[in-house]
Amino acid sequence: MLNNNYQKVLAEIRQAATEAGRDPGTVKLIAVTKVATLEQLLEAAALGIRDFGANRVQDAAEQVKSLPEVRWHFIGHLQTNKVKDVLPVYTMIHTLDRVSLAKKLQQVAERFDCTAEAMIQVNVAGEESKFGLTPEELPGFIEQLGSFDRIKVQGLMTMAPYVEDPEEVRPYFRRLRLLRDENAVEGFKLSELSMGMTNDFKVAIEEGATMVRIGSALFAE
């Protein structure tokens, strides 16, 4: 079942990228572990999936420990008191959204003598239930990040509203891409766009996503 799901998702990624005139190799699949069992994750790794995304530090602790050879992405809201648990083992943090978190990342990265790879989370749709900067706050936030030499910003991330018709969220993905283009400055090239989930990743790819975060399409029975 998992292999069938994986092949179907890969085919849909290839199709969406090709139809958008993009190289499918520029789109990275991040397998979201929230709905998966440990057995499914081990099978996914055996199939060749190398990027996994976790929403909560404690819930994913056993998963991370059991799969040390893959790249782990933290895609949930990150509390400052959890940074010390996340930074040493996660390849990238997708949810940098406030100066207090940047300060903590800088502090912990200095302690571990490492670099914090991060995506800036933008709440493009303005949903009260979601975290992230407003589009208007983004330029000022990027300017503030210039003083944190241990944080390497790779791009922007957003979570679109859940809707039945993915076409309804296309404007939000397009807006994030435009924000990326408008705010790419020296030292902040913002080459990555982390956007799109199971219900809307094809539209996200058409609008420029370089990372899609997919869980239930892979792991649901």
Image (cartoon, rainbow, N blue to C red):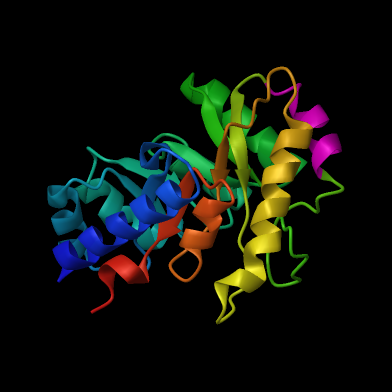
Judging depth in this view, the residue of 214 and 206 nearest the camera is 206
Asked if 13 appears above or below 221 in the picture, the reply is above
Residue 34: x and y in percent read 38, 66
Residue 188: x and y in percent read 68, 25
Residue 189: x and y in percent read 65, 25
**Chief secondary structure of the magenta span?**
helix
Residue visible at 58% across and 48% down in the picture: 81
Asked if 180 appears above or below 3 in the picture, the reply is above
Judging depth in this view, the residue of 94 and 165 nearest the camera is 165
Location of the C terminus (image quadrant): bottom left
Is-magenta flag for residue 142? yes
Location of the N terminus (image quadrant): bottom left
Residue visible at 42% across and 37% down in the picture: 26
Judging depth in this view, the residue of 101 and 213 nearest the camera is 213
Residue visible at 80% across and 54% down in the picture: 134
Asked if 28 appears above or below 161 in the picture, the reply is above
Q: What stretch is highlighted in magenta?
A: 138-148
Place residue 158 in its image quadrant: bottom right
Left or right: residue 81 compared with residue 84: right
**Residue 205 visible, this angle:** yes
Number of marks drawn? 0
Residue visible at 70% across and 24% down in the picture: 148
Is-magenta flag for residue 101? no
